[in-house]
Image: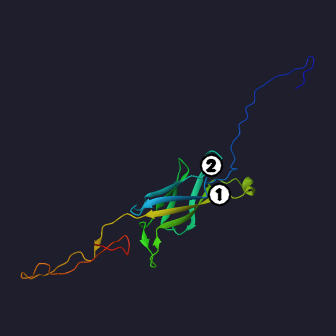
């Protein structure tokens, strides 16, 4: 304002309030994650927590997570912790399995491609690219030793009173549920 002789002037304070717009996509800090879990985890157990970062605030930083593909589809599900905006990977249906495949090759892991996406998308910023990010999660299932299992629940054997010491009166069979080629002694 330019002052002049005899001119009138005044001053005031102005408050400018800026609100956040959803112009930042979520980003995982790493391209891949690896978690080790015991095979004994029951259904509904938490396996891992993932957190994508979003430079926005409030509802513009709210995310949803989903498993987009991988060999663990149907085995795992992912939920959102509303407080922390983390994706929580949980066992969904079946017990985790640590086993040997028919070729004798150990199969003990699952790989998931997991996506974090903004819940609120502002159409004005769609030209900036997708408002989502994908990471790979490898879940390694660790063996938990189980005791041997007998082939039958009970065995019945008959022996003569006259049998000599060391006479074989029968056999029992057991197997190791941990591995098909693991001998039981």
The structure's colour scheme is rainbow
Q: Secondary structure at mark 1?
A: strand
Name the residue rendered at 11%, 81% in the picture: 159
Location of residue 25 in the rendering, given as x and y in whole percent from the top left corner: 67, 53
Name the residue rendered at 53%, 69% in the picture: 71
Name the residue rendered at 90%, 24% in the picture: 2
Which of the two discs, 1 and 2, labels the residue nearer the N terminus? 2
Would residue 80 appear left or right of 53 to someone viewing this image?
A: left
Location of residue 164 in the rendering, given as x and y in whole percent from the top left corner: 10, 81
Location of residue 176 in the rendering, given as x and y in whole percent from the top left corner: 33, 72
Query: In this rendering, is residue 116 above or below 162?
Result: above
Task: Categorize mark 1 by other alpha carbons within 10 Å: few (<14), some (14-19), many (20+).
Answer: some
Q: Quadrant of the C terminus?
A: bottom left
Task: Give the labeled residue for mark 2.
Answer: 61
Query: In this rendering, is residue 56 above or below 128?
Result: above
Of the pair 144 and 126, the residue shown nearer to us: 144
Task: Give the labeled residue for mark 1.
Answer: 132
The label on residue 19 is none
Name the residue rendered at 49%, 56% in the picture: 48
Count of all numbered marks drawn on residues in the image: 2
């Amino acid at each position: 304002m330019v002052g002049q002789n005899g001119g009138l002037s005044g001053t005031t304070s102005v408050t400018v309030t800026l609100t956040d717009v959803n112009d930042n996509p979520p980003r995982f800090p790493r391209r891949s994650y690896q978690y080790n879990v015991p095979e004994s985890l029951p259904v509904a157990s938490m396996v891992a927590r993932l957190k994508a970062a979003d430079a926005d605030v409030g509802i513009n930083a709210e995310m949803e997570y989903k498993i987009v593909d991988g060999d663990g589809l149907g085995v795992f599900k992912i939920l959102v912790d509303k407080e922390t905006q983390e994706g929580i990977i949980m066992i969904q249906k079946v017990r985790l399995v640590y086993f040997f495949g028919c070729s004798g090759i150990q199969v003990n892991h699952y790989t998931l491609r997991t996506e974090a996406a903004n819940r609120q998308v502002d159409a004005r910023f769609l030209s900036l690219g997708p408002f989502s990010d994908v990471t790979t999660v490898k879940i390694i299932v660790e063996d938990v030793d189980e005791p041997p299992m007998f082939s039958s629940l009970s065995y019945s054997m008959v022996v003569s009173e006259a049998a000599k010491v060391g006479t074989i009166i029968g056999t029992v069979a057991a197997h190791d549920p941990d591995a098909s080629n693991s001998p039981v002694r």
